[in-house]
Amino acid sequence: MIGYIAPDVLKQQWAAEVAQKAADEQILAGVRRVASESDLLINAAKGDLESLRKLEPGLRKFVSSYLDDNQRAELAKQRPIDIVAELDGWRAKGHAEPDADPEALASITRPTVEAAPDEQRRPT
């Protein structure tokens, strides 16, 4: 309807709904970001180099430098939802780590292979 002027009450309700929708979208974006970080961190702990590269520097250093192999293995078993609350603390620990050499990143992607006895390693 052309020339319609909405009452102030309707304008206020509309503004409140728009503001609530924007707030909901910000919350949802934050949840998506944290879920994505959790997935990347777990995949990096499993040895996925691409996930490791996508992590922000603090979490990258946390998984590559702060954790040892056993801790990475334990992290790799976690569900993303179970580590969300830990991300900020882990990010801070990663930022506190000294810069690692480039080999440190590659070392987490190499699976550890237990050496078999000599008889089992020889071709038959």
Image (cartoon, rainbow, N blue to C red):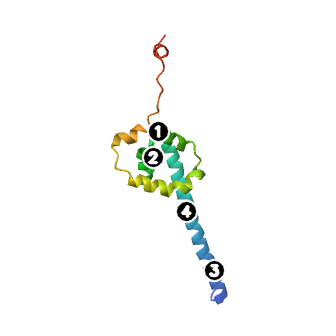
Task: Measure the C-alpha gap from mark 4 to mark 3.
Answer: 23 Å
Q: Could one spot residue 57 in this view of the protein? A: no
- Judged left or right of residue 112, residue 81 is right
Residue 72: % across, % down: 49, 42
The number of numbered discs placed on residues in the rendered structure image is 4
Q: Secondary structure at mark 3?
A: helix
Label 4: how many residues lie within 10 Å, few (<14), some (14-19) or many (20+)? few
Q: Secondary structure at mark 2?
A: helix
Q: Could one spot residue 58 in this view of the protein? A: yes
Mark 4 or mark 3: which comes first in sequence? 3
Q: Are marks 2 and 3 in contact (CB under 8 Å)?
A: no
Instruction: Quickly name the residue at label 2.
Output: 63
Residue 7: % across, % down: 66, 89
Task: Measure the C-alpha gap from mark 1 to mark 4.
Answer: 32 Å
Q: Name above or below for residue 34 compared with residue 14.
A: above
Q: Residue at 60%, 52% (x, y): give it.
A: 81
Mark 2 or mark 3: which comes first in sequence? 3
Mark 4 or mark 2: which comes first in sequence? 4
Instruction: Quickly name the residue at label 1.
Output: 69
Residue 39: % across, % down: 54, 49
Task: Measure the C-alpha gap from mark 2 to mark 3.
Answer: 46 Å
Instruction: Quickly name the residue at label 3.
Output: 14
Q: Residue at 46%, 31% (x, y): give it.
A: 112
